Image (cartoon, helix red, strand yellow):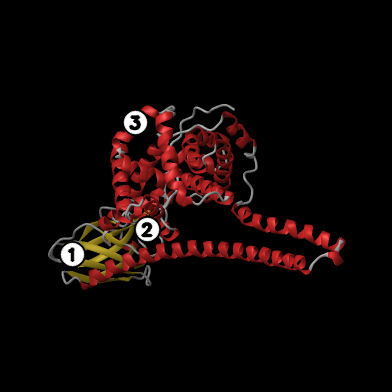
Amino acid sequence: MNIEAYIASGIIEDYVLGTASEQEKQEVACMSHIYPEIKEEVLRMEEAMEAYALKHQKAPSKQLKANIFAKMDFDNGPGTEESTDAKIIPLDKGNTPIEHNVEKDAQVASTRPKWTKMAVAAGLVLALLAGWAAYQLKALNGANSDMAERMERMEVELAYNSALADLYRDPSYKMVRLVGLEKSPESSVSAFWNDSSQEVVLDVQKLPAVPAGKQYQLWSIVDGVPVDMGVLDSDFDKKILKVKKTKPGTSAFAITLEQEGGSPTPTMEEMYVMGNV
Amino acid sequence: MATNTLKYTEQELVVGLKRNDRAAFEYLYDHYSGALFNIILKIVRDEERAGDVMQEVFLKIWKRMALYNPEKGRLFTWIVNIARNTAIDATRTETRKPSMVDVNDRTVHDQADSTERPDSGQEELRALVGLLRPERKQLVDLAYFQGYTHEEIANNLNIPLGTVKSRIRTALQELKQYFAV
């Protein structure tokens, strides 16, 4: 994605001004989650507008603060979320006149023209409709945030998958499959090695979760000697990990579990995966 | 009510608010009620009503604090949105004249305000006016303080939508530069 073009599109200004649509708001929230540059721009814009707003102050009456704080309960909290209250109000308003009408109807039923009953019926229908609409709205809102979460996850997956695809397609990278050893037969890691620049990146398909105080460390075997390639970020799932450069003449790669920060030489009993070039 | 003198970072403030800590809410009120009230008053245009809306807004902030997600943006952006939307809803239920007439009307009203009734902070405002060209400041204020959409502003002021967007964008970029630390 072209981040600069996205920032220049003006959507962030809309977001910060509050003029963006719900969908655009979700989108900016997602994007700023994925791209630090976008997050930075949103934050700087928010800070500027905050400073701008703070320069335009008008103090409410002194009494107001006391009135408001008298309504707040700091021992028990606000209780249940009130956003549904607003949606219940139309129902109440609809109900009150109905009850009123029903009472009167009972008293002077015979003299009442037919339309009053129809009005009551219409009122009931309206009340039901309002309730239904409120319910739908809530469901929709829920669906919307679910959607945003899914989109967020998909964006992350997509970025990861396309980075992987690029590596597979790039002829300058050689893929080396590191397979699980006795210690952990199910483990599997792919190393992509550029044998002219000696750059190496890793894609961990499966490795056991890292125990506390430990870290995985990558080694390359050059002329039969293990060379430290650095420790792996323990949050390696669905990420392309960049490690140190190797040396020409690399014959194999291996990963061992070491103390946090890594060791000068590999602990052979703790070797999890290995792959020959 | 004692005005608390503690100074919070945004992060500390959010933690306090989420813990339903009274001192944090007092700080929030002391620090932001002026800015929020200014926005509410610009939308409902009646001091007494604005006070009612302010109360509604602050209680909403209190009740919804659990829903605020700092990952998605700054606290102030979130509370400004609550204030703006609540104030706009309040004018809708009132069913006054259509908003079409309102924009021009409010614009004139705003200008009258600033020339005839200078209040505190006016000096700083003057510095800001020098910063933003009047035609841009007007658009930013209509959008940010009064919650008008770009389309509404374009229609009511008879300016092409593209011009509205680019002027607002330029103005916000200028503000960003100006306030950048």
Q: Nearer the viewer, residue A211 or B78?
A: B78
Q: Amino acid at mark 3?
A: Arg
The total of numbered circles placed on residues is: 3
Q: Position of residue A52 (x, y in %)?
A: 38, 38
Whole-angstrom CA distance, mark 2 to mark 1, is 30 Å
Quadrant for the C terminus of chain B in the image? top left
Mark 2 vs mark 3, CA separation in Å:
51 Å
- Say which of A163 and A202 sits in front: A163
Marks 2, 1: nearer the viewer: 2
Subunit that carries the residue with mark 2: A
Question: Is residue A229 found left or right of A154 in the rendered image?
Answer: left
Verify CB contact (< 8 Å) between mark 2 and mark 1: no
| Nearer to us: label 2 or label 3 | 3
In the picture, the disc for residue A224 is 1
Chain to which mark 3 belongs: B
Do discs 2 and 1 belong to a common subunit?
yes
Direction from residue B115 to residue B93 in the image, left or right:
right
Residue A20: x %, y % from top left:
41, 55
Q: Position of residue A62 (x, y in %)?
A: 57, 29
Using the image, tell me which numbered label, if any, was put on residue A235: 2
- At horizontal 46% and vertical 31% (from top left) the residue drawn is B7
Q: Which mark is residue B126?
A: 3
Label 2 close to label 3 by CB (< 8 Å): no
Q: Quadrant of the N terminus of chain B?
A: top right
Nearer the observer: mark 1 or 3; the answer is: 3
Kind of residue at disc 2: Asp
**Chain for numbered disc 1:** A
